């Protein structure tokens, strides 16, 4: 039995609170059960050097876990000589996931920074960051249209993400930390709002998995993504 008598195909309780930062162009606090991530979006009128004079914009992300987001304290990244590899990998995942649903040319030479800070971690922090990062970005684009042209729409669609896994031989949706730790297979699915796959990260933690098991996790991810997108739409006001 899963925690809180949750069915194998059910997500944890999802909450998205917007407007939690008065300075950022877009912000939200997203919760998947006990996982809580603060996401902000900042619009800057400049782009990285490789895009100067190209007429194109850019979306980039930074992911970080606060020192007491986990059961034991973790040092902040700035105290380390080399950046944490996991932090860099997740930051890049968030950035490319969000760029997949943005018309960068429509932004002009502007950049949006998505900052995702994990306040509390109980599994699925990267998927929560992508899901909340999209909400913060979509709100920022609303302000972009108000400041510039209401006819310009950089967003091509929506994006969300959810974790799945094989635990005790059973496919499960939206793993918490204990399930993630015990999973024989761990996977993260990034999905567009129209049901297409943006990225799949799947790893056999203990035993190799079959195509049938991968298909079963994908089916759960599609179901979960549809539910998550409803929460996103409500938060954005669509």
Image (tube, rainbow, N blue to C red):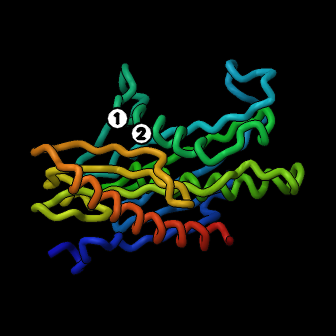
Q: Can residue 37 be spotted in the picture? A: yes
In this picture, residue 66 sits left or right of residue 145: left
At numbered mark 2, what does the secondary structure look like: helix, strand or loop?
A: helix
Q: Which one is nearer the viewer's eye here, 10 or 133? A: 10
Find residue 151 and report its image quarter.
Answer: bottom right
Q: Is residue 35 left or right of residue 102?
A: left
**Callout 1 environment at 10 Å: few (<14), some (14 to 19), or many (20+)?**
few
Please determine whether, in this image, residue 52 is positioned above or below residue 161.
Answer: above
Q: Quadrant of the C terminus?
A: bottom right
Q: Residue at the location (33% across, 36% down)?
A: 75
Measured as percent of width and height from the top left, residue 176 is found at 26, 61
Image point 80% across, 36% down: which residue? Answer: 108
**Could you classify mark 2 by the number of other residues whose Cα lies within 10 Å: few (under 14), some (14-19), or many (20 or more)?**
some
Task: Tell me residue 101's x, y (percent).
Answer: 62, 48
Whether residue 73 sits left or right of residue 2 in the image: it is right
Quick check: 227 above or below 207? below
Residue at point 19%, 73% (across, down) = 2
Between residue 40 and residue 175, name the one nearer to us: 175
Distance CA(mark 2)–CA(mark 1): 6 Å
Report the number of numbered marks: 2
The percent position of residue 3, horizontal first and vertical second, equals: 21, 73
- Left or right of 207 in this view: 99: right
Q: Residue at x 33, y 56 (%)?
A: 163
* Residue 86: assigned label: 1
State the quadrant of the N terminus.
bottom left
Marks 2,1: beta carbons within 8 A: yes
Label 2: which residue?
90
Indicate whether 117 appears above or below 234: above
Judge by depth and name the residue closer to the eye, 135 or 156: 156
User: Residue at the bottom extreme?
Assistant: 5
Q: In the image, which disc is placed on residue 227? A: none
| Label 1 element class | helix
């Amino acid at each position: 039995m899963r925690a809180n008598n949750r069915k194998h195909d059910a997500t944890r309780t999802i909450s998205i609170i917007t407007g939690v930062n008065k300075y950022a162009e877009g912000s939200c606090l997203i919760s998947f059960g006990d996982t809580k991530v603060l996401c902000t979006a900042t619009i800057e009128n400049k782009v990285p050097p490789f895009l100067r004079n190209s007429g194109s914009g850019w979306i980039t992300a930074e992911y970080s876990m606060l020192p007491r987001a986990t059961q034991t304290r973790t040092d902040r990244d700035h105290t380390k000589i080399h950046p944490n590899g996991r932090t860099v990998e997740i930051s890049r995942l968030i950035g490319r996931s969000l760029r997949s649903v943005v018309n960068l040319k429509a932004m002009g030479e502007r950049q949006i920074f998505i900052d995702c800070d994990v306040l509390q971690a109980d599994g699925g922090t990267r998927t929560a960051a992508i899901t909340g990062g999209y909400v913060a970005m979509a709100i920022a684009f609303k302000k972009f249209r108000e400041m510039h042209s209401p006819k310009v729409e950089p967003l091509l669609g929506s994006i969300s993400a959810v974790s799945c896994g094989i635990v005790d031989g059973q496919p499960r949706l939206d793993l918490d930390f204990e399930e993630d730790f015990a999973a024989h297979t761990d996977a993260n699915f990034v999905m567009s709002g129209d049901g297409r796959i943006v990225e799949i990260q799947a790893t056999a933690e203990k035993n190799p998995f079959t195509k049938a098991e991968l298909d079963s996790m994908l089916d759960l991810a599609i179901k979960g993504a549809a539910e998550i997108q409803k929460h996103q739409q409500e938060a954005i006001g669509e």
